[in-house]
Image: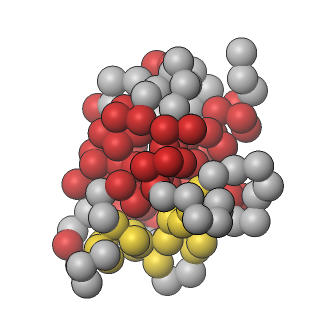
Amino acid sequence: MATKDQQVKHVVEGVALGVLAQGVTAVTSAKIEFELAFNHAWRNWSRAAHFPSITGFDPGNQFWIGVGKSEGRRGARAAWQRGRWSEPYVLLNEWTVDECIECHADERASAEDWKDLGALYVSEFKPEDLRRTTD
């Protein structure tokens, strides 16, 4: 069984890839919107039970903290850079989002599952709180 930190790290990376797979390059870094969007997506994601350490009243806070730790993390495929915007990015040179998400998939969540979580997450933001590749 993975530790709480390992589960959070895996989810932070999976959401980064899932968000990028939606054509979204950044979401607002406003903490309340960031966490509430995650809370809603997490409650509606079919694979959340496979990450039992991410629970409680506000799993979005665990996600927020994990995103803050992700920048510069070694051994990950994707991370987040946070400033005015929270920007997911691929860490592996010359790898596509699809290649990374396929490698990130395991028995807990498939590549499609991570894309679904990314879609649930970005759907919770107002249009002005998202930046897309088409912007």
Residue at point 29%, 32% (across, down): 44
For residue 68, above or below residue 75 = below
Quadrant hosting residue 53: top right
Q: Residue at x 43, y 28 (%)?
A: 110
**Count of numbered marks:** 0
Query: Foreground: 113 or 30?
Result: 113
| Residue 129 visible in image | no
Q: Is residue 81 left or right of residue 99?
A: right
Which percent across, then down, holds residue 129?
A: 30, 74
Query: Is residue 12 depicted above or below 110 in this figure?
Result: below
Name of the residue lying farthest toward the front: 94
Up the image or down, 31 lies above or below 42; here it is below
Name the residue furthest right. 74
Taking the image as shown, residue 43 lies to the left or right of residue 99, namely: left
Q: Position of residue 12 (x, y in %)?
A: 56, 48
Quadrant containing the N terminus in the rendered view:
top right
Q: Quarter of the image holding residue 24?
A: bottom left
Whether residue 84 appears in this view of the structure is: yes
